[in-house]
Image: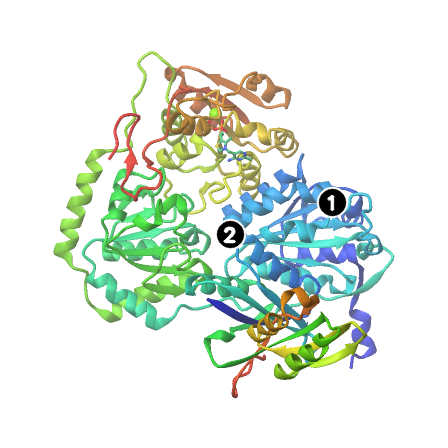
Amino acid sequence: MRRIISILMENEPGALSRVIGLFSQRGYNIDTLSVAPTEDKTLSRLTLTTFGDDLKIEQITKHLNKLIEVVKLVDLTEGAHIERELMLIKVKATGAQRAEVKRSVDIFRGQIVDVTSTVYTIQLTGASDKLDAFIGAIGETQVLEVVRSGVSGISRGEKVLSL
Amino acid sequence: MHSDLEVATVEMLSGAEMVVRALQDEGVEYIFGYPGGSVLHIYDALFQQEKVNHILVRHEQAATHAADGYARATGKPGVVMVTSGPGATNAITGLATAFMDSIPMVVLSGQVRSDWIGDDAFQETDMIGVSRPVVKHSFMVRDAKDIPEIMKKAFYIATTGRPGPVLVDIPKDQTAPNVKNPYEYPKKVKMRSYAPVSRGHSGQIRKAVEELMKAKRPVIYAGGGVVQGEGSELLTRLAHRLNFPVTNTLMGLGGFPGTDKQNVGMLGMHGTYEANMTMHNSDVILAVGARLDDRVTNNVKKFCPGAKIIHIDIDPATISKNVMAHIPIVGPVDQVLEEMLAALDEHGGEPDQKALERWWEEIAGWRKVHGMRYETNEDGPMKPQQVVEALYKATQGDAYVTSDVGQHQMFAAQYYQYDKPRRWINSGGLGTMGFGLPAAMGVQFAFPEATVACVTGEGSIQMNIQELSTCLQYGLPVKIININNQALGMVRQWQDMQYGGRHSQSYMESLPDFVALAEAYGHVGMKVTKFEDLEGAMNEAFALKDRLVFMDIYVDPTEHVYPMQIADGSMRDMWLSKTERT
Ligand SMILES: Cc1ncc(C[n+]2csc(CCOP(=O)(O)OP(=O)(O)O)c2C)c(N)n1
Ligand SMILES: [Mg+2]
């Protein structure tokens, strides 16, 4: 099962490498990863997605919690949450395709953020499966380049991950 | 705001002086190390004080094992200093050894100047990176002003919660003698991201007590956490109070007295028949400070099919890692056991005596099988087991015994009865050959008057034999019991049992003359080849109170360690000798 683990950790050099190292060392895999400082510059928020059954996820979260620089963490998939990923994608856009691509962008509520005579650069946000679906709709052969931010997530309602 | 007067009283120290002062403030007696370019400022500061004694080893790996042995014997953190690059990488095996066995240690490594880091400077290694998977935590000093706080945190993290080694990497410029900063050693540390559990959950403890009261075939399975967590006395009280059988892991030996009649011996791969049978047939297992690792459980799918597991450990990640615990209790072993004893009082009940009586009878039957017997040779070479038994006798069971890794280690675990915690010192988790001699040095520094024996093999001893020189320098009267089977015995045993007896690279040709070697290093050497000489030689060796004696004892090269669990089986599947299996 896919899980989104969100971590609040000390914004210190080396902290990220410990998180990453833990995954490779213990044979867990990281599917996506995003990290940036929070409103409190001494803290970073790291969101990662991984796959595993309950037992494996429990081990992962226990080991993450043991890392000295990890302050708090939550498995967002355990409760109601909002999940977003940003994608920047360059697609071929010539002739009749231009209108076709534009239509897909509208349907997926994306934005064309840069245009040349042959290429559209599109920005799209949403859950990861929506981004996958967009690529499917455009057709992989039309895609020139894809950049995805990795998943960010936050719980719904009043629950917060903070100190 | 500070008044002028207060500012005037704050000491101004260089980074190097801060490091040494912090060691003093931590009450460090010994630091094991080896100098080199990056740590010379610190060595100069060490030279100008007398509180912290530096022990010069002959190889940085030995420094780590010596500090580790010191820590295991005393419970205090072991401290190490090495230079950057090769000095630091030589310390890796020792860090990994301490990490696997949860030993508190602080390792200070030199680093090239801050502005050279990343440039492939002379003797530069990314020590933080290289050591990352084998340390509890690590720090890089980025500003000399931070040294007091970093040192305080390093000792705090190493010694609290589940203990472990902490590395502090110190670039040379941060220790420069001409740059002074105010020094004040923090009295306390508070870290928002690190708060070791201080108490087990009372509800869970009461639930465990209920379960223990209902048990008909209980067993207490006690690991290294009992020794490390100062839980021996409480565990012994609990076991006596309940009249339950107790088995110790390799790391837990001495956590419950070896000669106690409730002790069914060590469990696991080379555990006793009765310990493994007791575990397999139990209905409630009280696991205390143990990891349920593969050397204990054998095939986890077949592990103790009828048992409910109560698991006490300081580390939540250890619980239900390999085997699901029915009643997990996360907390310090001593506190949890203390509360468990109180909960027993409160409960007021007694365990099922009738059932216990039957259980003990069953165990007595397994004991009669006597899995620990071995055959002796009438005329041929003596048996390694005889050597350990002779050692037990010569030391009245009261020595500190360190060991290396191999058959001799298992014999030392099986045939020496440890009645006290911290007496049996071995690399259980990593299984590091070369651990024994330097560890014995660390123990001897901690207890100069104590009898310290290093049980080793002719393979292992050669992995850190250069430390004979250190022993001479500091007059360490360690007794080396070299169980010489002229082979990498444990490897050969596996080759006998699983590879059709093809001894690929497991024999030792061209062994040195160990007696001459010991003498060359300024020690006493003894060679023993006949059983009838063994006892006399041992007594003679241990009578030499102030000398290191290297006893090179020739034993039967064909002997195997038994019992031995059959791979992939359950706990009760064992070879009892070369020809008998369960
Ligand atoms: C550093 C290291 N290298 C290799 C091994 C694998 N190993 C385990 S036991 C053993 C043989 C040890 O030989 P010896 O010290 O003579 O002990 P014996 O088994 O003969 O008693 C070896 C090579 C190890 N444990 N540690
Ligand atoms: Mg040998």
**Residue furthest bottom in the image:** A158
B243, above or below B445, in the image: below
Q: Position of residue B452 (x, y in %)?
A: 49, 35
Amino acid type, mark 2: Ser
Instruction: State the residue position of label 1.
Output: B83
Left or right: A48, with B371 as reference point: right
Q: Nearer the viewer, residue B360 or A95?
A: A95
Q: Is residue B193 visible?
A: no
Q: Residues within 10 Å of mark 2 (few under 14, many from 20)?
A: many
Disc 2 to disc 1, C-alpha distance: 24 Å
Disc number for residue B102: 2
Residue located 74% across and 64% down the image: B146
Left or right: B429, with B108 as reference point: left
Q: Position of residue B228 (x, y in %)?
A: 46, 53
Q: Nearer the viewer, residue B373 or B126?
A: B126
Q: Secondary structure at mark 1?
A: loop
Q: Position of residue B460 (x, y in %)?
A: 53, 30
Which image quadrant is residue B55 in? top right
Q: Secondary structure at mark 2?
A: loop
Q: Nearer the viewer, residue B525 or B196?
A: B196
**Residue furthest top in the image:** B379
Left or right: B396, with B157 as reference point: left
